[in-house]
């Protein structure tokens, strides 16, 4: 890859260090039908250096990013598994909590007109963003790759080589424990180090982990 105007930069990534790719779609770029492509690779330096060097394509048409994905023989993400509706409720509740934090101080100060205007403006936007965040959720296994997608302000689709996954992180918030959800993190010695599959039912998440990397997580499970 070569880029730069005042300072030109050229980065070469050896194929055996590539562990996958990540399609990044910031909101404004996504609305324009665009995306950028990042490499998930080892040997690019520390976290800051990795972020500077990992770009495989600048922001541009999403079709061009997918063309580059195909050129380096990685699969385009298709037919990802949807997440349960309870994940939508979690995002809506989070969005409403943010609106409440903004409106409550106005009410405390007695600024009722400003509070009403803020609520009328923010509530529809918050619910729309929560719905968009839910629609972005998806995961799946495509051949020798694991695919995970999430995000609203910056929607990211990680396409990881399954043989590059070296571990799983399993996290559950109080809300997730109450509703039987779990967040799985596929860890790899490349890129950001951990790529998460958010808010899936526990049984489905564990089956997915076993399907993606057979035997890696099974030794640490207690079957009832």
Image (tube, rainbow, N blue to C red):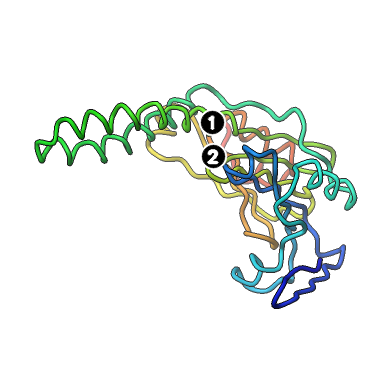
Q: Mark 2 points at which residue?
A: 152
- Residue 209, quarter of picture: top right
Residue 220: % across, % down: 60, 45
Measuring from the top left, give residue 88's x and y in whole percent.
48, 26
Disc 2 packing (10 Å; few <14; some 14–19; many ≥20): some
Tell me the element at label 1.
helix
**Count of labels shown?**
2
> x%, y% of residue 62?
75, 42
Q: Reply above or below: 206 against 38.
A: above
Tell me whether the residue at label 1 lies in contact with that at label 2, contact meaning CB atoms closer than 8 angstroms: yes
Q: Residue at x 68, y 43 (%)?
A: 157
Image location of residue 64, percent across then percent down: 81, 46
**Residue at mark 1 to residue at mark 2: CA–CA distance:** 6 Å
Examine the image and state in which quarter residue 118 appears: top left
Q: Is mark 2 on a helix, strand or loop?
A: loop
Relative to 108, is 68 above or below?
below
**Residue picked out by circle 1:** 132
């Amino acid at each position: 890859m070569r880029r730069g105007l005042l300072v030109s930069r050229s980065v070469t990534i050896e194929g055996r260090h590539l562990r996958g790719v990540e399609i990044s779609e910031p909101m404004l770029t996504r609305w324009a039908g665009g995306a950028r492509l990042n490499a998930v690779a080892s040997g690019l330096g520390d976290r800051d250096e990795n972020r500077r060097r990992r770009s495989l394509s600048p922001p541009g048409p999403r079709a061009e990013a997918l063309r580059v994905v195909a050129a380096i023989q990685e699969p385009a993400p298709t037919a990802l598994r949807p997440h349960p509706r309870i994940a939508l409720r979690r995002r809506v509740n989070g969005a409403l909590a943010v609106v409440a934090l903004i409106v409550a101080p106005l009410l405390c100060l007695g600024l009722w007109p400003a509070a009403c205007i803020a609520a009328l403006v923010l509530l529809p936007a918050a619910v729309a963003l929560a719905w968009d965040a839910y629609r972005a959720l998806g995961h799946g296994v495509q051949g020798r790759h694991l695919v995970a997608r999430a995000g609203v302000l910056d929607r990211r689709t990680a396409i990881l080589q399954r043989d590059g996954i070296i571990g799983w992180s399993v996290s559950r918030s109080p809300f997730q424990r109450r509703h039987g959800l779990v967040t799985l993190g596929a860890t790899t010695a490349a890129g950001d180090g951990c790529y998460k599959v958010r808010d899936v039912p526990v049984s489905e998440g564990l089956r997915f982990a076993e399907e993606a990397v057979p035997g890696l997580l099974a030794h640490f499970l207690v079957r009832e």
